[in-house]
Image: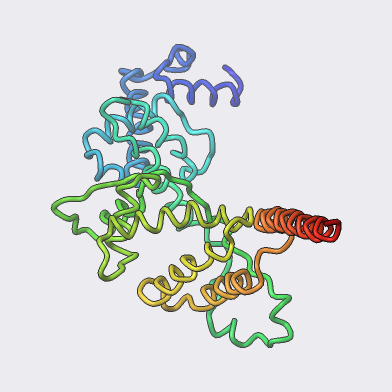
């Protein structure tokens, strides 16, 4: 009779890989011992498949329950649990899902699955009590600089190149639109969509407004950083802040006031000595002095020649 630890390892091997060779010596008694073992094998697979379907309902909604069940079964066979807690099972499933059929799989499927996994983990990883607003306002002004906020331990930052959060909102609302276009974050189409839905500026077409904002954000900060045409660069940026404050984010006046004060300082005082504007001014000042000194010498020479005559 094998030791208990060895017997447990053999049973695990038989369940996860469907290979019961190591258990042949103990599968005795009764009828159809292999059939009884097969019941446990099917139960093991069905339990983990059900766990994956419950963890990724939005992903199943996206690709279909039949395809999701098929991939989940393949994942269970290839990735047996490595932790005793079933809540930790499935973290690698989005990668496995996206790799099944790369040509037919949507390019955002892995990121969407990872987002759903983290949403599920955060929902059960609340280890700190929620902080009410009334508790914050009771903190005295003297003690406020020393206050430190601690985030929930399960909080995660998910980086995505696609607008998968919009797709998740469609699933959560339960009322998908007739037409939904998922865009990449770093695409021009997504930029225009932002100006259509969120950055709504009156009297300007969203594409025109997006192009103007893009040109300003890509060129003017560079000019301010190197100190070239500093005063001229601050004017359109101040205008953009006024537009944002008036039409887009009227409640963000504190941030806009800080930005505006910095730009007004550059507009009135100039960029300072550590700038290209300063070097350009010195160059032209030296040119003016050179030209002025040459004219003065010419005038003195003319007077001296008249005296000699």
Total tally of numbered discs in the picture = 0
**In which quadrant is the C terminus drawn?**
bottom right
**In which quadrant is the N terminus drawn?**
top right
Horizontal relation, residue 264 to residue 181: left or right: right
| Residue located 47% across and 75% down the image | 252
**Residue 274 seen anywhere in this rendered image of the structure:** no
Q: Is residue 238 above or below residue 162?
A: below
| Residue located 33% across and 33% down the image | 72
**Residue 200 seen anywhere in this rendered image of the structure:** yes
Q: Position of residue 105 (x, y in %)?
A: 29, 31
Q: Position of residue 221 (x, y in %)?
A: 55, 56
Residue 258, image quadrant: bottom right
Q: Position of residue 278 (x, y in %)?
A: 70, 58
Q: Position of residue 250 (x, y in %)?
A: 41, 78
| Residue located 59% across and 26% down the image | 4
Horizontal relation, residue 295 to residue 166: left or right: right
Q: How is the image coloured?
A: rainbow
Q: Nearer the viewer, residue 139 or 55?
A: 139
Residue 300, image quadrant: bottom right
Q: Nearer the viewer, residue 15 or 58?
A: 58
Residue extending furthest toward the front = 309
Q: Nearer the viewer, residue 70 or 264?
A: 264
Q: Nearer the viewer, residue 298 or 261?
A: 298
């Amino acid at each position: 009779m094998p030791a208990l630890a060895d017997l447990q390892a053999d049973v695990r091997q038989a369940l996860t890989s469907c290979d019961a060779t190591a258990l042949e010596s103990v599968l005795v008694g009764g009828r159809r011992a292999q059939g009884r073992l097969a019941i446990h094998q099917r139960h093991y697979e069905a339990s983990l498949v059900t766990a994956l379907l419950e963890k990724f309902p939005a992903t199943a909604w996206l690709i279909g329950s039949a395809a999701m069940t098929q991939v989940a079964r393949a994942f269970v066979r290839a990735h047996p649990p490595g932790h005793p807690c079933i809540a930790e099972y499935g973290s690698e499933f989005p990668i496995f899902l996206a790799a099944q059929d790369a040509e037919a799989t949507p390019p955002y499927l892995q990121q969407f699955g990872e987002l759903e996994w983290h949403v599920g983990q955060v929902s059960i990883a609340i280890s700190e009590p929620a902080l009410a607003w009334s508790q914050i306002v009771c903190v005295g002004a003297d003690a406020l600089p020393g206050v430190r906020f601690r985030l929930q331990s399960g909080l995660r930052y998910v980086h995505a190149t696609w607008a998968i959060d919009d797709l998740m909102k469609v699933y959560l609302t339960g009322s998908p639109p007739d037409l939904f276009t998922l865009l990449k974050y770093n695409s021009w189409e997504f930029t225009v969509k932002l100006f259509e839905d969120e950055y709504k500026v009156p009297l300007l077409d969203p594409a025109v407004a997006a192009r103007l904002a893009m040109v300003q954000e890509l060129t003017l900060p560079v000019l301010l950083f190197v100190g070239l045409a500093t005063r001229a660069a601050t004017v359109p940026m101040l205008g953009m802040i006024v537009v944002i404050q008036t039409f887009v984010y009227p409640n963000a006046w504190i941030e806009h006031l800080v930005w505006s004060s910095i730009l007004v300082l550059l507009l009135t005082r100039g960029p300072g000595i550590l700038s290209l504007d300063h070097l350009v001014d010195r160059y032209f000042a030296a040119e003016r002095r050179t030209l002025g000194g040459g004219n003065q010498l010419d005038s003195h020479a003319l007077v001296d020649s008249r005296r000699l005559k």
